[in-house]
Structure formats: structure tokens, C-alpha cells
Image (cartoon, rainbow, N blue to C red):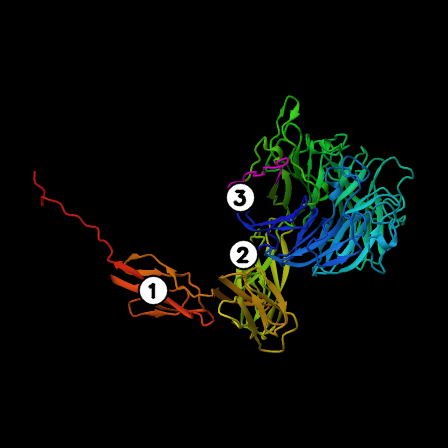
Amino acid sequence: PGAFQTNFASGKFDISIMKLTPDGKNRVYATYIGGSGQEQPHSLIVDPQGNLILAGRTNSSNYPAPNKFGKGGGFDIVVTKLNASGNALIGSIIIGGTLDDGVNITTVVGTNSLNRNYGDDARSEVIIDEANNIYVASCTQSVGAVSDRFLTTPGVFQPAPGANQDAVVLKINPNCNAVIWSSFLGGTSNDAAYVLTLGNNNNVYVAGGTGSIDMPEISSSRVIQSTRPPNSPDPCDGFIVELTNDGSTVLSGTYLGTSSADQIYGIQTDKTGNVYVMGTTESDFWPVINAGIFGAPRSKQFISKIQPDLSAYIYSTTFGSGSALPNISPTAFLVDRCENVYVSGWGGKTNPLEGYGTGTTRGMPIAGTGVIKPRTDASGSDFYFIVIKKDAASQLYGTFFGQDDPIQGGTPRTVGDHVDGGTSRFDKTGVIYQALCANCLKTVSFFGTPGSWSTTNNATVGGACNLGMLKIRMDFAGVAAGPQSSINGVVSDTAGCAPLTVDFTDTIQNAKSYIWDFGDGTPPVSTTSVTISHPYTSVGTYRVTLIAIDPTSCNIADTAYLNIKVGDNKAMLDFTFAKPGLCTDLSYIFTNTSVPTKGAFKPNTFTWDFGDGTRFTTSQNPPVPHTYAGPGTYIVKLILTDTSFCNSPDSVSKEIRLSPIVKAQFTTPATGCAPYNAVFVNTSGGLTFLWDFGDGKFSTQVNPTNLYPSPGIFIVKLFAFDSTSCNKSDSTTFTITVVAKPVAAFTFSPNPPQE
């Protein structure tokens, strides 16, 4: 209830989003996002305020996006920003030309060009920068006539397409309602951008797969690989391109590939700016350079560390079983602060069932403590997670994950755990948040952890597949600092009015000790507690510094920052309401009587929430009319979103009990033991109330309590008033009997006892 979209919007598929508490035990919200056609999410990321940004695709004519970039048609790319509560859009935009956008290769079944795994048609990524700007890597087939093309912006590095299918890169504003820049990326064959990351200088690195021998972004001889062999028999190679943050200039670009099919599915940078890529190869001869002792010759998954200007390998290695084809379809990639490398992926029979040739997870290396599943199932169809130490010195961890899949009569009993496309994520501390298409056919059990929100597969249609949600903490990323503020119980709030007390928490909680500097000139505080409070008495913006310390970790200490804004221009929020029509009407006029202590309210910075699902954004004046569909109790909220005031966002709420006829009624137990604290639940209509508790005491609260210290019989009377109703007032009575508490006692005879 209260989610942004509570109903399936028809069509074949809608996007569905579910947020759980960090321990996975409770659902925070769940919502659909979709229209009358088909939708699919490709990539998710959460900003520091808890808002969710998703990138995906739709072919619906009524997808919830008030903004459009390009002519549109077929499938289009969607980028949508959902608020932290899951009940409202912050922004949403549809992006595309007249053909398919966000769809990698027209034929999506079977190995074809860049489409090497089941789900590769749905690869793309969304990330954000420190200012909450949004970046998207994807692809487009809208490369024809100018009027039908994927739309680009002036001054970008490649304003015109190559041919067939091109990669695309976009930067979108933080409100997710306007494209800052948009560009093609590609040559005269098929190209797709799967992943992207930001360098230390905020340059944009983009990577993916290409069949083009003439990508215009790759022209320098000073990079690792400036050409692909002409007429090469392999359908694709990986590529990396470095762009300026304004999208105007290519700084460097390189192919990465062999004479067989190669693609890049992950890209990261470290604290010194070095670039790491992860992908798969179908060659026995991926370059192994300067790696430590870890690696598996002729294996088909690779990790490469590269100079920031893409001029040379720092190291490169392969991992896997040494099979003829890649073991896994990669789904997530991370380089942590200690330069350890993390990879997740899935392998097994889903690929051959869909016409692809990828191998199985059999023979993948297992290592470390806390291994979840030490052996893959009989068909080699599992998820696989691996952590490799800095400079490929050794394997720190490796485990399988998934349901057991026995084979009967030579035939597997299930489809195997997999994904239907898109990317999952590691966070910077090395925790994997993995989505799984799990437990298809339900012929074997899929284990959920005790106490988690749902431990059973309740699917009843199709292949009975269900979404699996997996979180694993691998504990190799070193100590980390994650400061979070809370003001008046509002988590992540960073602004308030003086005097202001802010509660701080380290959300990572893996340090041995902490140093807090609150930025206001007070001495830093050393503590071993993960929580601390601090008062601010003066107006200003304060940079809070948290140093998290663990001398035994690979990085010893980590520092993070948080800005707190303290003001003195509080807005005093209030409103009134009145019924202007007949007593039988349910139409009201709401008047915003809020007062700014300094300055004035900006236009359109108030939102009315009328408690019936209706929200309306407006200025302070004029008064706003609203008609309710029927009688009931409604919580009306006036919300201030003008961030120039120190208490914004803030709100004031009032309860309205609507009924043409006032009827006084309440519930409470009929008996109790003295001293008895009676609790009264008011179920009346009415706007104001008067209670007579029958003992000489009175109350005007909506739901009061009353203490009866002594036994007795009391007649409680409730008066309900609403001057706008037809009968103006009503009353009711109820009798409460308060008795003395029973006393435990007994006698016996004869006393004294006799023999």
C-alpha cells in the first residue's frame, strides 16, 4: 500500500522493484514500474539519499515518464529515479529513436555477434557521480535516417552513427528529467557499451564489445591495441574508451581482443587511477602479463589492470577451469580500496537450452573460509563468486551458490539458476547484491536463510521461476568509513535549524575505533562506538570528517566526509480547511497559512497530500480545493520542499474525519482492575471531541487515556462535533466497571495440623 504503482499495468512484463531491510528480514517497499507493453530493468544504483535510479527498456506507449528524448519507437531506453520511500517518482525519461534502443542485437536467441550469453541482449549500466549526475552506457539500432535516429546533443565526440548497431553514452541531470549530453560510440559493424565508470579526474571510461574494425574512438598507436585484424574471423573484441566528462572529447581508446570472440563485462578504477577490466574470451591465448601466482592457463575469464591512459597492461591474468568455452556469464565486478578484485557470474545449462555455447561451472576454483557451496551441482549450473588478491597474487575466496540440480536419466531436473540480463553490484566494501532467476520448475529446493522475508518459491505460472535475492559479505576490502546523519529521527537528513543536534552513525561498522571531526572548531572526538551525537549552535555549513581505523586491515584507516547545513530561517508550517458547500458535500478548501521567518516561499515548493492517494504541487496561494470520494478518516499533509529553508523538507499533518452525519462511537474494554488505565479508541466522525470519563475528569484528545485509581462503575460519555455536518454533533455513552484486584489467599484446617 502506498507504493508508486501498486498494480500490474498489463502487457507481458513490468519492472518490479523490492527493497528489503539490510538483514533481508523485512520488506521496506515493493512497486511496479511499467506501462501497457513490455519493460525490463538492466541496471540499478542507489544515491546517498536512498533514491533509486534504474536503467532499462520499454516498448510501452504509457510508461511513467513525463520526459522524452528522441522520437521513440520499438523498444526505448528508460532512466527512472524513484524516491527512497518507493512511493513517488523524482524523475523519469524515455530515450530513443524509431528502432530498438537498449536491445543488444536484433536476434536475441542463440549465439550471434555480440550476443554470447542468454541475457546479453539486456546488458547496460547506470552510475552516478558525487553531484548525483547520472551516466548510462547502452546501445541503439536507431542509426538510419536523421529524423529517425537516436538523438545526440551538440558538441559531443561522435554525433553521427556508424552503422548497424552502435554503443551510446549519456549524461543525465540529477533530477532525471533532462539529458546533459548524448553520443554514439561505434563503427560500421555492431557495437555495444555494457559498462562504465568514472576515473579520479572524473573522466568517463566506457567498455563493451565491438565487431567494428573502424571505431573512430580508437585511432592512437599509443594504446595497447589500436586495430583489429581486417576480415578477422572472430565476431567481436572488447573495447575501452576514455572520455572527458562533458562528452566532447575522446582522450584514449583501445581494443582488447584475440583472434576469437572477446568482450568486456566490467570496468573499475582504483585510487591511483589505474583501470581494471573483466570479461570473457574464447581464445586459449589471452595475454597473461606480470600477474602474481594466481591464474589458470587457457581459461576463458580474464582480469586486466591497465594504465590510466590505456597505453599498457600493468598485469593481466585468466581464471577458470581451462575449458574450451567461458565458464560463466559475468554479472558484477569490483575493485576494492585494497585493490582486490571481485567477480560474480553464472554458468550452466540455461545457455545451451537457449542456443548459446557457454560452458559450465565445473572445475572453477574454490578457496577461503566461509565457502557457501564447495561443489557445483551435477550439471555445472550455478552462480560463482571469486575474490582475487591485489596484483593477482593469490585467490582469496571462491564459492558456488545455487540449488542442487541432480541429473536423472541423463537429463537435468531444472533449468538452472541464472539471470535474464542486466547487472548486479558489489558495494565498495565487497558485499555482493546479486539478483537470481531461481528455482525454475520447483523440482528441487532452493534455500533461503532463516528469518528472511520469503524463504519459499510461490510462483505458479510459466516455468515457476522466482526472483532470488542474495547478499554475501566477503570481508576483504579493509576498513571503511560510512558516515550517516540523522536529524529528529529522519535518517540521512543533513540540514536543520539552529540549535541543532545531529546523530551520526558509521554505517559500515567494521572499524576498531573512530575519530570524528564535526567541522565547527570543537576538538575531534575519539571513540570506539559506532554512534555519536553532536550539537550545532551557529549557522553555517560544516564538513564532518570520519576516520575509521583498524590497524590489522590492509588499508589501516579510511576517511569519509559529510556536510551538515545549519540555518536560522525556519518556515512555520500550518494550514486550515473548511467545507464551503452543503453538509452532505465532501468537498473542502485547504488554505496554506505557513509563515517564513526570513525571506519568502518560492513558487511551486509546497505539495499537498490529501491522504487518499492524491498529491498536488503548488505555491503557497491560492487556497486549494479537493473533493473526497467518500466518508472516512484521512491524514492530510502539507509538505515544504523549498530547500532554502533550514527545516526543509518538512511537513505538517492533520487528521480529517469526514462524514455528512456525525456519529459518536468508540471502543474500550468494559472491565479492568484498579488502578486501571483505560485506553479509548475513537472511531467517530467529527472534527473536535469532548470526553467525560464519569469520574469528574474530561479530555479533548482524539484518542485519550484515563486512570481510574479505585473500583467503581463509571459512565463514559463522548461528544463529537463537526459544524459542517448535517447534524453538527452527536454523543454516546459506555459503562466501565473497575474492580479491586483479586488477592491470592487460602486457609487450611485443622490448624495446627493434628495426627
> In the rendered view of the protein, which quadrant contains the C terminus?
top left
- Closer to us: 597 or 574: 574
N-term mark: 2 or 1: 2
Mark 2 or mark 3, earlier in chain:
3
**Which residue reaches farthest left?**
755
Cα–Cα gap, marks 3 and 1: 41 Å
Q: Whole-percent x and y of residue 349?
A: 69, 31
Residue at the extreme right of the image, as rendered: 230
The x and y percentages for residue 190 are: 84, 43
- Which residues are the magenta region? 449-466
Q: Nearer the viewer, mark 2 or mark 3?
A: 3
Amino acid type at mark 3: Ser
Number of the label disc, if any, that sits on residue 530: 2
In depth, the one of 748 and 294 nearer the eye is 748
Say which residue appears at 53% left-offset and 58% top-offset. Answer: 531
Q: Are marks 3 and 1 in contact (CB under 8 Å)?
A: no
Amino acid type of the residue tagged 1 in the rendering: Asn
Q: Which marked residue is nearer to the observer: mark 2 or mark 1?
A: 1
Q: Residue at x 14, y 47 (%)?
A: 747
